[in-house]
Image (cartoon, rainbow, N blue to C red):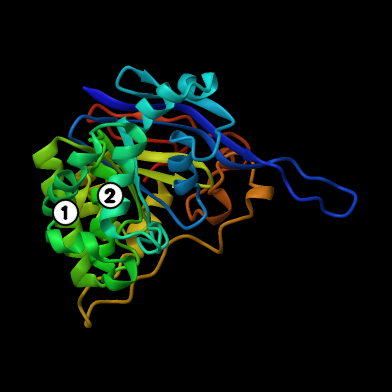
Amino acid sequence: MTLLRVEGLEKLYPAPRRGWRRPAALRAVDGVSFSVAARETLGLVGESGCGKTTVARSLLHLVAPSAGQVWIGDIDVTGAFREGRRERELAVRRAVQYVFQDPFLALNPRWTVGEALAEPLRVHGLLPPGAWPARVRDLLELVGLEAGHAARYPHELSGGQRQRVGIARALAVQPRVLVCDEPVSSLDVSVRAQILNLLGDLQDQLGLSYLYISHDLASVRSVSHRIAVMYLGRIVETGPTGAIFASPRHHYTRALLAAILVPDPNAPRARSLALGEPPSLLERPAGCHFHPRCPAALADCRTTVPAMVTDGAGHSFACHNPG
């Protein structure tokens, strides 16, 4: 069953003026569509600046999307925020929650952990105030923290503990979907594994669905059922995790996989197969955006946007000359 559905999502920003000329708007997200099933994790990957975080913030209306439709189950997210009715907006917030990249900046330094976890209960009116302390204790236990952590401030916690608090706060309203935006990128390697294991346990226990955003393909591989690859605002390949890693069809995906570091000092150094640097979003190439960096580009790649093609196993890719 599809739980999260995104169709034709776009986000444009006004472009800065260059002398007397104002270029076209900066298109950060360009017609992105995907879905996430119940109890499924979709990994959204790509280089920094490709639009991953903008997709997440747009579908949650943390920034207003320029076009597109988003549904969470039978909730029309786009329509709810278009109407501007607070009760409908709160219903969306209860259905989907955000786990931020930097757990320290995501928490109010003047609030204790207990106050931070009780705030969603107050805003959404889920429980009477007398029941908040018990719910806070339950949330801390759920993410592997002790009840005594409720009296601490964020600066008194380690990075891993702060991220556990961020996850607990997201779970306070009992969402069905978590958007995890680089949730382990600021943590030590050993702590990363603990947080990823926690997310897996919570998915099994609570039946959650995840949109997991990262540029760390190793962590994406360990937690994702399917992967969507983004380049310059577009999704260029999607498919089951095993298929993406075993037989990538888009040359950008191949370049990302070739750049993965291997924990072996005797292994050859990882090297990206992509040529040069990503172009500016203000001056995106025509046709396939990747063609100036692609070692297998054809003449059609320079002029025609490739259509998304799907094979019989649910593996989709947009490439004129697939690998």
Residue 288 in percent (x, y) is at 55, 41
For residue 162, which quarter of the picture? bottom left
Q: Amino acid at mark 2?
A: Leu
Residue 290 in percent (x, y) is at 53, 49
Please give the residue where the numbered disc 2 appears in the rendered image.
117
103 and 272: which is toward the camera: 103
| Residue at mark 2 to residue at mark 1: CA–CA distance | 9 Å
Q: Residues within 10 Å of mark 1 (few under 14, many from 20)?
A: many
Q: Are marks 2 and 1 in contact (CB under 8 Å)?
A: yes
Residue drawn at (50%, 53%), measured in percent from left and top?
Answer: 294
Q: Residues within 10 Å of mark 2 (few under 14, many from 20)?
A: many
For residue 163, which quarter of the picture? bottom left
**Dot 2 or dot 1, earlier in sequence:** 2
Residue 141 in percent (x, y) is at 11, 53
Considering the numbered disc 2 on the image, is that residue within a helix, a strand or a loop? helix
Considering the numbered disc 1 on the image, is that residue within a helix, a strand or a loop? helix
Residue drawn at (15%, 42%), measured in percent from left and top?
Answer: 203
153 w.r.t. 263: above or below: above
31 w.r.t. 294: above or below: above
Q: Is residue 153 visible?
A: yes
97 and 137: which is toward the camera: 137
Q: Amino acid at mark 1?
A: Leu
Identify the disc placed on residue 140: 1
Residue 310 in percent (x, y) is at 33, 28
The N terminus: image quadrant:
top left
Residue drawn at (23%, 77%), measured in percent from left and top?
Answer: 267
Toward the bottom, the furthest residue is 265
Q: As drawn, is 120 to the left or to the right of 171?
A: right
319 w.r.t. 270: above or below: above
Residue drawn at (70%, 40%), measured in percent from left and top?
Answer: 25
Q: Is residue 145 visible?
A: no
